[in-house]
Image (cartoon, grey):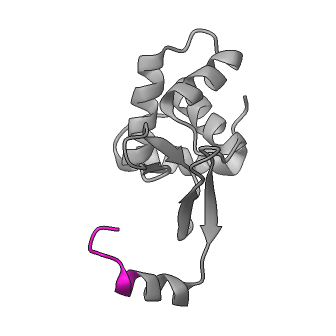
């Protein structure tokens, strides 16, 4: 799986900020996340990554995801007691979770609406 050049540059710049270097595995995991914006779990990322990089381990996927979160290229999404999911959409948006299908959907919201929502939500939401 090939990482688009603009995404590769973003990854390299973000890693440089943490004095880390790009690796094939980091690029590959980032490419997997960008290819389908469906908020996969680490296990789902592993299954997808392994298809085109058979040598990648689950531990490497977890390490890559942790670094991508630290670099602020990916956000963690948590719902109740569900496994952590990963979202590469860095725009200001909300997540809606379908209890029936388990699907998580990004909902783009205007700045005005985000401000109004933040005013009524408890701290930390």
Which quadrant is home to the C terminus? bottom left
Quadrant in the picture for residue 53: top right
Q: Nearer the viewer, residue 85 or 13?
A: 85
Given the current orientation, which residue lies at the most extreme top position?
A: 55
Overall secondary structure of the magenta stretch? loop
Q: Nearer the viewer, residue 44 or 20?
A: 44
Given the current orientation, which residue lies at the most extreme left position?
A: 123
Give residue 17's position: percent from left, percent from top: 38, 50
Q: Is residue 111 visible to the viewer in this orientation of the structure? A: yes
Residue beneath the point at 61% across and 40% down: 33
Which quadrant is home to the N terminus? top right
Q: Nearer the viewer, residue 21 or 119?
A: 119
Q: Nearer the viewer, residue 67 or 122?
A: 122
The magenta-colored residue range is 118-125
Whether residue 122 appears in magenta in the rendering, the answer is yes
Residue beneath the point at 44% across and 82% down: 117
Q: Is residue 112 above or below residue 43?
A: below
Given the current orientation, which residue lies at the most extreme front position?
A: 100
Q: How many marks?
A: 0
Q: Is residue 52 above or below residue 12?
A: above
Whether residue 16 appears in magenta in the rendering, the answer is no
Give residue 104's position: percent from left, percent from top: 59, 51
Residue beneath the point at 26% across and 73% down: 123
Q: Is residue 21 above or below residue 125?
A: above
Give residue 37's position: percent from left, percent from top: 67, 48
């Amino acid at each position: 799986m090939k990482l688009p050049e603009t995404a590769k540059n973003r990854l390299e710049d973000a890693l440089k900020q943490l004095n880390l270097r790009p690796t094939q595995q980091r690029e590959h995991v980032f490419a997997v996340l960008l290819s389908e914006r469906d908020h996969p779990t680490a296990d789902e990322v592993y299954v997808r990554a392994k298809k085109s990089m058979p040598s990648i381990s689950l531990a490497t996927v977890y390490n890559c995801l942790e670094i991508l979160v630290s670099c602020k290229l990916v956000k963690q999404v948590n719902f109740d007691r569900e496994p952590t999911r990963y979202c590469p959409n860095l725009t200001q948006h909300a997540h809606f979770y379908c209890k029936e299908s388990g699907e998580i959907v990004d909902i783009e919201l205007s700045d005005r609406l985000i401000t109004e929502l933040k005013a009524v939500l408890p701290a930390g939401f």
